[in-house]
Amino acid sequence: MDFEQLVIGNTTFLVLPDDPLRPLTAQEREALRMSMEQYGCITQVLTDKDGFVLDGLARLRIAVQYGWPYIPWRVLQCEEGVQYNLRETLNYARRHLHKHERKGAGL
């Protein structure tokens, strides 16, 4: 299976398919971009040992789009098969979702 790849510097990040959460709205994305422009990327992108992004995909996409040479990231040591659940948990805790969006994502 081919996975979407995002590259920053010498690091290749892989995108897990089937994200149950909605993408950021244009307004949310722009607010994140402006925050990153002003303060940098404060929160690390988290990946599993194989390079799949578990948290920070929106930050990563913005960094790639604007040609950042580096973004802080860290590998989480997690058991096989928990990547999807971990990704949902990490994003759900921070994302401002309406009740119907949470229910639709199975959260």
Image (cartoon, rainbow, N blue to C red):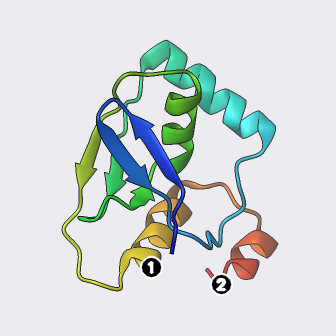
- Kind of residue at disc 1: Asn
Q: Which residue is at a point 37% across and 39% down the rendered structure image? A: 43
Question: Marks 2/1: CA distance?
Answer: 11 Å
Name the disc covering residue 85, or none: 1
First in sequence: mark 2 vs mark 1? 1
Q: Write down the quadrant of residue 106 in the picture.
A: bottom right
Residue 17: x %, y % from top left:
57, 70
Task: Please state which of residues 24 and 101 is positioned toward the viewer in this rendering.
Answer: 24
The correct choice, above or below, for 3 with respect to 106 in the image is above
Q: Are marks 2 and 1 in contact (CB under 8 Å)?
A: no
The correct choice, above or below, for 19 with respect to 96 in the image is below
Name the side, left or right, on which 70 lies relative to 5: left
Name the side, left or right, on which 58 lies relative to 10: right
Q: Which residue is at a point 51% across and 24% down the rendered structure image? A: 36
Mark 1 element type:
helix
Task: Please state which of residues 23 and 91 is positioned toward the viewer in this rendering.
Answer: 23
Q: Which residue is at a point 46% across and 77% down the rendered structure image? A: 84
Crowding at dot 2, Cα within 10 Å, few <14 / some 14-19 / many 20+, comes out as few
Residue 63: x %, y % from top left:
50, 29
Residue labelled with disc 2: 106
Residue 40: x %, y % from top left:
42, 21
Q: Write down the quadrant of residue 58 in the picture.
A: top right
